[in-house]
Structures are given as structure tokens and as C-alpha cells.
Image (cartoon, rainbow, N blue to C red):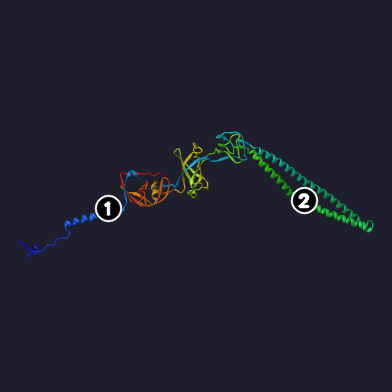
Amino acid sequence: MLISRFKMNPAGDDQTILGAMDRKVARPFLTKRRGVAVVVITLTILALVFGYVRYGITQFVTVDADRLTVATVERAVFHDYIPVTGAVVPRTTVYLDAVAGGQVAQVLVEEGALVKAGDALVVLQNAALQLDVAGREAALAQQLYQLTTINLSLDDRRLQRDRELTETEYQLRLLTSQLERKRPLLEGGYVSRTEIEDLERNLARTRSTYDSMKAAQAADDAARPEQVAQLKQSIALFTNNLAMTRRNLEALTITAPITGQLTLLDADVGASKAPGQRLGQVDSAEGFKVRANVDEFYLSRLAVGQKAETEIDERAIPMSIAKIYPGVKDRQFAVDLAFVGNTLPKALRRGQTLHLKLEVGEEADSLVIANGEFYDDAGGAWVFAVSPSGGAAVRKPVTLGRRNPDMVEILKGLTAGDRIIISTYAQYENIDRIDIKGSISKGELQP
């Protein structure tokens, strides 16, 4: 039996005195107690680090599920369209104006009546215009008389020249014949040389006169067609002026230019109408079209023939752009849309308001998400993606493309089946994670 011997050291402490057979045993550093302490300290540090990362760096908020709307990313056909509001207008509208002006003498139809082309609607009276027509007729008659007189004088002048030319030609032949008869008698001394010379001088003068008259007649004949043409042109001008004045007189009777409905008439008996003043309008009975105003941003993206669609009595009605008005007013421009085929609704009325989907781009098979307030709040740069468990939503960068009122095109950052919050992000601009309390609702994607 090993007996340990103890002795008191000078300091008074107990000290074990080992014998020759005693051996000192070393105590291990990592004891059970120390191991437990290390594990506890490590877990505490990890918890602190996790808490700092989660609650110190990451900005989060807890939101009730009923305050959020969630939609699922799907693959579907994206229709690039914009919503516009249009008004039903007649396909053709013709306005009635007082061309010459005057006082309303008779109103033959009432506003709203169905009329045929050529029917008399309103009769005006204008004494000044009637006197003007009478004066123009008298002036035209005077001009026609003068022109006729000039034309007759030209004919008389030609006849006179013809007579003078005939007489001169006769004298020329007569002198020539006398000279030919007397010239042989000169050698026999039966006639004097003086007589022969006188005949030769008379013959030369008569020939010169004949040649001058012939040249003058040729010049008159050459100029006569132009003179006659000018006379006819002057007569035609006077006649056209008179016809125009008479048409103004006839325009005092306002007639229906087309067959349709007299939808507006502003004419009371005795009222004075200035030249060019609007009296009413006639809408054609052929059908209707829709006129809509579109934001000027889309002016370069629209063309005649592009498709549109409206819904009437729960029935989709196809339409297409028939005309684009390039003028911009109040940052908008107008377009006319026609009904395609035989789809014109029977119950359509002038002035009726229709809501249309106007295509501004090609449709494409894409990843899409239901449209919501999130797009404007985040600028299409990021979204809150919901975890598979639905207990949280994490901020995630994305790239979004085109947008219509129903859906948004996804270009990058999401895949089919992902769920994102599509309600407003206004209160979560600086938030990285949303902890969701309760069951979330699901937004419906309208194709």
C-alpha cells in the first residue's frame, strides 16, 4: 500500500510528498466540462452572427397575408395593346353650309328626319344676289352682242377684201390682154410707144396692188382662227361667270347631298345666315365607325389596318384602323376604326361610347405575370418573390418587358411557376424581405 507523505511547506500550504515508487498523472486539457462550454459559446456566437445578418443588415417587415396579392408566373400569349375609349360616329357625315348666305325663307324638313339625296331642306332668299345675277346676265348679253358684232365685222372685212381682190384681178387680166394685143401693132406704127409704156406701167401697178392685197388676205386668213378662238374663249369665260353666279342663286335652296338622317339643323324662318355659316349635317345611312383619341406616344406605332377589339353585349367585335389623323391636339391624335366584316351590331347608336383594345405591337408567346401596382412602384426592376412555403417574400432583381392592362412580359429573373407579390410596393421600397402572416391570396392572370 502506497502511503503518501505530507509535509507543511514554509508558506503553510499542503504539498504532497511522493515516494520513490510514486508517478504523477497529467490531467487532459479538453474535459467534458470544457467541451460543453465550447459548444455553448460557439452556438451563442453563431446565433449572434445569424441574428445580426438577419436582423441587423437585412431590412424586413411582417405583413398580414390579406394585405398582399400574389400571382404566379405563367407562359402565355402576350397581346401588346392599349386601352382606348371611342365614340360611335357615322361612317360618312356631310355638312350643310349657306354658300351665298341670306335670310331663311322656308324650312321644309325637321331635324332628325330621314332624307334622300337631292331633297330640298331649307330655302334662303338674297335680294342682292338676285340683282347681281340679273346684272351679270345683262352684262353677258351686252358682251355677247359686242363679240357677235366684232365677229360680223371680221366677216364683212373678209368679204370686202374678196371683192377688191376680184376687181383688181380683173383689171390685171384686162391690162395684160390689152398689152398683148397692142404690142405687135407697135412695129407697124399703128400704136405709139407712149401708149404701150402707159399700159406697161398700169399693168405693173395693178400687179403690185394685187400682190399686196393677196398677202393681206393671206395674213387675215392666218390670224382669223386665233381671233375666232379668242372670241370663243371670251364668250366661254362670260358664260362660266354667269353660270357660277346662277349656281350661287340656286344654292339658296339647301338640298340633301346624300341619303341619310338630318341629325342637325340650325335654321329658323326669318333668321339671317352669313356666307359659309353651318346650317346642319346629314349622316349617311350606310353604317358607323368609331373615332378614338390616342396618346401621341403611339403615333409612330400605329398604321392603317392594325387590329382592335371591343366588346358589345358580351360579344367580342373585331375592328381595324381605317384612318389616322396626324394632327396632335392636347397631346393626343385621332384614329377612325372600322368594323371588320359583317360584325356591325344592330343596336349601335350615334355617340355611343365603346371601350377598345388597340394593338400596338405583335403578339408573342412569353413568360407573363398579372399586371399590378408593383410595376410602377418598382419601375419594373425588381419584385418580391414568394418562397415555396409562402411564409416570406424576398426582394429579387428582374427584367420586365412590355406591359398591357392585364399582364406584364417577363424577360429575365423569373421562371414559370414562380410566385410574386403584385400588389403595391409603396411601403416596401427599402425592404429586403417580407415575412407573411397567414394565407396569401392569388391574383388571377387575365389572358
Q: CA distance from mark 1 to mark 2?
A: 121 Å
Quarter containing the C terminus: top left
Residue type, mark 2 in image? Asp
Observer-nearest of 393 and 362: 393
Which label number is shown at residue 168? none
The x, y position of residue 361, in whole percent, is 46, 49
Label 2, residues with CA under 10 Å away: few <14, some 14-19, many ≥20: some
Q: Residue at x 74, y 42 (%)?
A: 145
Label for residue 51?
Answer: 1
Image spot of residue 208 (x, y percent):
83, 55
Q: Position of residue 3 (x, y in %)?
A: 5, 62
User: For the residue labelled by badge 1, is the local secondary structure a helix, a strand or a loop?
Assistant: helix
Q: Callout 1, which amino acid?
A: Gly
Label 2 belongs to which residue? 220
Residue found at x 78% / y 46%:
153
Q: Secondary structure at mark 2?
A: helix
Nearer mark to the viewer, of 1 and 2: 1
Task: From this view, report whether residue 96 is shown above or below residue 24.
Answer: above
Residue at x-position 82% and y-position 48%:
163
The quadrant in which residue 272 appears is top right
Label 1 crowd (10 A; few <14 / some 14-19 / many >=20): few
One can see residue 387 in this view: no
